[in-house]
Image (tube, rainbow, N blue to C red):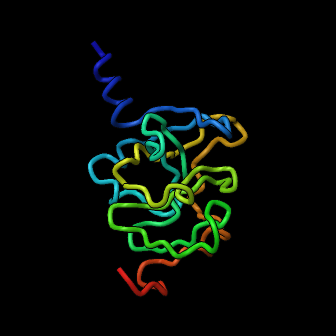
Amino acid sequence: MWAPVAIFIADNVISVARIKGREDVVLLNKWSVGWDSTLNLKKGDIVTLWSPSNPERLITKRIIAMPGDCVVPLPVHSEGTPSLVRIPKGHCWVEGDESLHSVDSNTFGPVPLGIVNSKVGFVIWPPSRFGSINSNVPDWKRKRIYESGLTPYNGD
C-alpha cells in the first residue's frame, strides 16, 4: 500500500544516489528543481542533469554561471583562443570539479535548466566527507565568470 508513496517520493522529492568518480553516496533534492528550477538554483550548486551528449545518462556537475552571465571556456576543450560565451535565458554553464578530466559545458556549451534533474544536498558516504555540500565556486573558476551587468560583453 505504501509503494506508490515511496515511488512518488523517490521520483519527485528526495532520493539517494552514488556519484561515480568520487564514489560518494549523496542525497538528491529533486523537489528544489521541481516546477521552476530558475527559482532555486544558483552558482555553486552541484546538480544532476541529463547529459546533452547522451540523454540517457545522468551526470553530476557544478553550476558555474547562470542566465545573463558570461564565461571564458577552458582552452583545453577548444581550438585556438577561447571566446566569451554569454549564457542565454533558461540555461546555465556547468563544469565538473576536475575540469581537465570532465565532459561539461566546456565541451557542449550552455545547458537548458530544464534538463537539471536534482540538486545534490548532502554527502552520506564516505564518513570522512559526511555533511552538506560546499557550494562555493573555486577561485580559479570564478575568475573566468563575468556576472550579468558587469560584463565587457557588448552584444545580445
Closer to the camera in the image, 46 or 6: 46
Residue 110, image quadrant: bottom left
Q: Is residue 99 left or right of residue 37?
A: right
Residue 69, image quadrant: bottom left
Quadrant of the snapshot with the N terminus: top left
Closer to the camera in the image, 131 or 54: 54
Residue projecting furthest to the right: 128
Residue drawn at (65%, 67%), measured in percent from left and top? 75
Vertical comparison of 108 with 86: above or below:
above
Q: Is residue 143 left or right of residue 105?
A: right
Residue 2 picture location, percent across and down: 30, 16
Residue drawn at (47%, 44%), measured in percent from left and top? 51
Residue 118 picture location, percent across and down: 42, 44
Closer to the camera in the image, 150 or 125: 150
Residue 124 picture location, percent across and down: 60, 36
Q: Is residue 126 left or right of residue 11?
A: right
